[in-house]
């Protein structure tokens, strides 16, 4: 007997509690592509789905997971997909309806199992159990540390809050001839984005950028100063300073902040006080690196090996307190 199709007018309400055989004609107890409004408010069809891109990612390999990330300090939104051991960032946010492609690869290698992500502070952290979590701050995250070295005082002045709070009412002040800027970032970076206030440099000066590498400052390559005006007037306008990213960049502690360190100096003194409202970094997604929190912790244990007695002596009580009368005497220690 061939299948027969019977029309069933949905004229009643949605009732997901009463058994279907006891419902009145035209009532609905369950069904695909419909959702319950309320027990007494009837039913409603779901909106369904739309095709957002017509070209499959990575030759038709299945998408393992989808992620959304918004940088909480600057509303920088990203829609990301995990597919074929890669992370893709959508070109459109959300993807354009009936677009030809989804987006571009972030250039990192991830696992084949579905990944998870969360936002910690300003940064997006992705993990799937295959290796070190991926760490990313979006297009231009704020810097980790911003210090001005006052040559006259031979001291670092901490402007991290002023350069990273996103407020136009706070700014760092630069000016003297031998003063330098020290910027620390969470990961290796390839540029800095400067937002300047009303006070900018108006005298022809050039900028030099160095990175901390192998225990010394080394000039970066491919430097392009987008803050220049009139040829060589650095910090004369808002702009981006870029250079070639290097895996040789290493971390350093400045002002109790540990991060990848970059030194900015000028050929001569600027025209006057220059206000830097904010400073952001340009850094790619990368496996997370360990960093010091900036706080000193007490040691969990300490023993001194007395060679003459051929024994270890418990010494935590001598080094684990602030009393100057208690100390570990190592004057007789030998190699």
Image (spheres, helix red, strand yellow):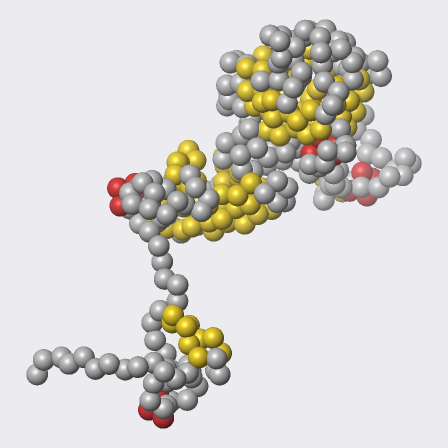
Q: Position of residue 38 (x, y in %)?
A: 49, 78
292 vs 150: above or below: below
Examine the image and state in which quarter residue 89 appears: top left
Kindly identify the residue that appears in the image at 55 percent across and 20 percent down: 242
Q: Position of residue 247 (x, y in %)?
A: 50, 23
Q: Is residue 68 left or right of residue 120?
A: left
Q: Quadrant of the N terminus?
A: bottom left
Q: Quadrant of the C terminus?
A: top right
41 vs 34: above or below: below
Check the image and name the residue furthest to the left.
1
Kindly identify the residue that appears in the image at 74 percent across and 11 percent down: 270
Kindly identify the residue that appears in the image at 48 percent across and 82 percent down: 39
Check the image and name the residue furthest to the bottom.
22
103 vs 33: above or below: above
Q: Is residue 259 visible?
A: no
Kindly identify the residue that appears in the image at 39 percent across and 67 percent down: 46
Q: Position of residue 317 (x, y in %)?
A: 81, 43
Q: Is residue 111 left or right of residue 265?
A: left
Total marks drawn? 0
Q: Is residue 186 visible?
A: yes
Q: Nearer the viewer, residue 238 or 259?
A: 238
34 vs 193: above or below: below
């Amino acid at each position: 007997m061939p299948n027969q199709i019977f029309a069933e007018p949905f004229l009643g309400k949605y009732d997901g509690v009463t058994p279907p055989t006891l419902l009145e004609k035209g009532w609905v107890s369950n069904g695909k592509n419909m959702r319950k409004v309320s027990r007494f408010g009837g039913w409603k069809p779901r909106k369904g789905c739309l095709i957002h891109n017509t070209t499959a990612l990575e030759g038709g390999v299945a998408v393992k997971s989808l992620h959304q990330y918004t940088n909480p300090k600057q509303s920088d939104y990203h829609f990301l997909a995990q597919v074929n051991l890669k992370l893709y960032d959508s070109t459109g946010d959300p993807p354009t309806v009936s677009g030809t492609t989804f987006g571009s690869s972030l250039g990192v290698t991830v696992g084949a199992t579905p990944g998870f992500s969360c936002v910690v502070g300003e940064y997006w952290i992705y993990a799937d159990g295959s290796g070190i979590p991926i760490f990313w701050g979006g297009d231009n995250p704020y810097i980790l540390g911003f210090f001005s070295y006052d040559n006259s005082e031979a001291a670092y002045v901490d402007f991290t809050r002023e350069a990273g709070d996103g407020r136009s009412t706070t700014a760092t002040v630069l000016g003297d001839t031998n003063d330098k800027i020290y910027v620390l970032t969470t990961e290796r970076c390839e540029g800095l984005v400067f937002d300047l206030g009303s006070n900018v440099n108006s005298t022809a000066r050039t900028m030099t950028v160095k990175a901390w590498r192998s225990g010394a400052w080394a000039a970066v390559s491919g430097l392009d100063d987008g803050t220049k005006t009139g040829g060589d007037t650095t910090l004369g306008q808002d702009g981006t300073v870029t250079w070639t990213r290097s895996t040789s960049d290493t971390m350093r502690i400045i002002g109790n902040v540990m991060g990848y360190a970059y030194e900015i100096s000028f050929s001569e003194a600027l025209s006057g006080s220059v206000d830097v409202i904010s400073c952001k970094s340009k850094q790619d997604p990368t496996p997370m690196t360990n960093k010091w929190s900036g706080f000193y912790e007490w040691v969990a244990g300490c023993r001194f090996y007395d060679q003459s007695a051929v024994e270890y002596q418990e010494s935590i009580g001598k080094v684990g307190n602030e009393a100057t009368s208690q100390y570990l005497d190592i004057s007789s220690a030998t190699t």
